[in-house]
């Protein structure tokens, strides 16, 4: 079985400061990892993914994520947070033994204060 | 127009009523999914379909049924709604590519269902 943990329900940062949203995963095969963002009254939007290759993945809106196989983590980061980054963020995992199905974490609410 | 359209966006109904949530997509994707979102529980997969003739149960399919009427249409039905089915429902699509594990999901805006 595959699973995802987002240990923080809420992350608060000041505008201009770096942000990190944490994600750890468990899979039986090779992990395929995704971050999605949900703005109020909207569906989820894709931010970035890790399939293979460079452990640092760059995505939309200046976000990046670092894959760490030994720690089974895929933390989302941004060097300088914006108020408009405030949203609900979901980490998701899929492995190559669970065709076509992604498992999502419970979500982390990011609040960026001016 | 949105790539993935869900109707209705909001619905209030009573226990025991039959409800259908509809999803249509213009992305030409083969794969379609229905997820349920509850606060603090993330998204849970209800049903998924890899093509018109392929329907699969997800982790929480009890109390739900689906119909894939065409490549572009995937509807979710609650035959007899109950209050614990109150949730935000999302339809999503993905493309069948050579590296199918890399499929990114495209989501609709969601259908908020309240069962009284």
Image (cartoon, grey):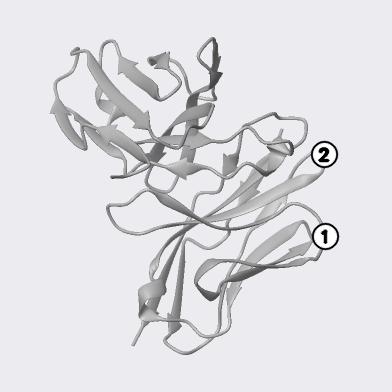
**Could you tell me which residue is drawn at 35 percent across and 29 percent down?**
B24
Asked if residue B45 is positioned above or below residue A10 in the image, the reply reads above
Q: Along the line of sight, which residue is nearer the eye, A2 or B76?
A: B76
- Give the label on residue A29, or none: 2
Hey, which residue is sitting farthest right in the picture?
A70
Identify the subunit bearing mark 2.
A
Q: Where does the image place residue A76, in percent across and percent down from the top left?
A: 60, 67
Q: Which quadrant of the structure image shows residue A67?
A: bottom right
Q: Where does the image place residue B33, in percent across and percent down from the top left?
A: 48, 29
In this picture, residue B66 sits left or right of residue A33: left
Q: Mark 2 falls on what kind of element?
A: loop
Dot 2 surroundings within 10 Å: few (below 14), some, or many (20 or more)? few
Asked if residue B51 is positioned above or below residue B102 in the image, the reply reads above
Query: Alpha carbon of mark 2 to alpha carbon of mark 1: how far?
Result: 16 Å
Q: Where does the image place residue B16, in percent across and percent down from the top left?
A: 20, 12
Name the residue tied to disc 1: A53
Placement of the N terminus of chain B among the 4 image quadrants: top left
**Could you tell me which residue is drawn at 34 percent across and 28 percent down?**
B23
Q: Along the line of sight, which residue is nearer the eye, A36 or B59?
A: A36
Q: Where does the image place residue A83, in percent across and percent down from the top left?
A: 36, 79
Same chain for the residues at labels 2 and 1, yes or no?
Answer: yes
């Amino acid at each position: 079985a595959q699973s995802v943990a987002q240990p923080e329900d809420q992350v608060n940062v000041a505008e201009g400061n770096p942000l990190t949203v944490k994600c750890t995963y468990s899979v039986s095969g090779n992990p395929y990892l995704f971050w999605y963002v949900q703005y109020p009254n909207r569906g989820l939007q894709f931010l970035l993914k890790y399939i293979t290759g460079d452990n640092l993945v760059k995505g939309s809106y200046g976000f990046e994520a670092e894959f760490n196989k030994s720690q089974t983590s895929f933390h989302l980061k941004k060097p300088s947070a914006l108020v408009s980054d405030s949203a609900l963020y979901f980490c998701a995992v899929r492995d190559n033994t669970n065709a076509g199905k992604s498992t999502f974490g419970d979500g982390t609410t990011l609040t960026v204060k001016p | 127009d949105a790539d993935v359209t869900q109707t209705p966006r909001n619905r209030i109904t009573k226990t025991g009523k039959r409800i259908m949530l509809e999803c249509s997509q213009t992305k030409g994707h083969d794969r379609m999914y229905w997820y349920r979102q509850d606060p603090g529980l993330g998204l849970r997969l209800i049903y998924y379909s890899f093509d018109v003739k392929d329907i699969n149960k997800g982790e929480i399919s009890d109390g739900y049924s689906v119909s894939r009427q065409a490549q572009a249409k995937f509807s979710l039905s609650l035959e007899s709604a109950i209050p614990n089915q109150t949730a935000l429902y999302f339809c999503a699509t993905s493309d069948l590519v050579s590296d199918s594990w890399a499929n990114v999901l495209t989501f609709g805006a969601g259908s908020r269902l309240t069962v009284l």
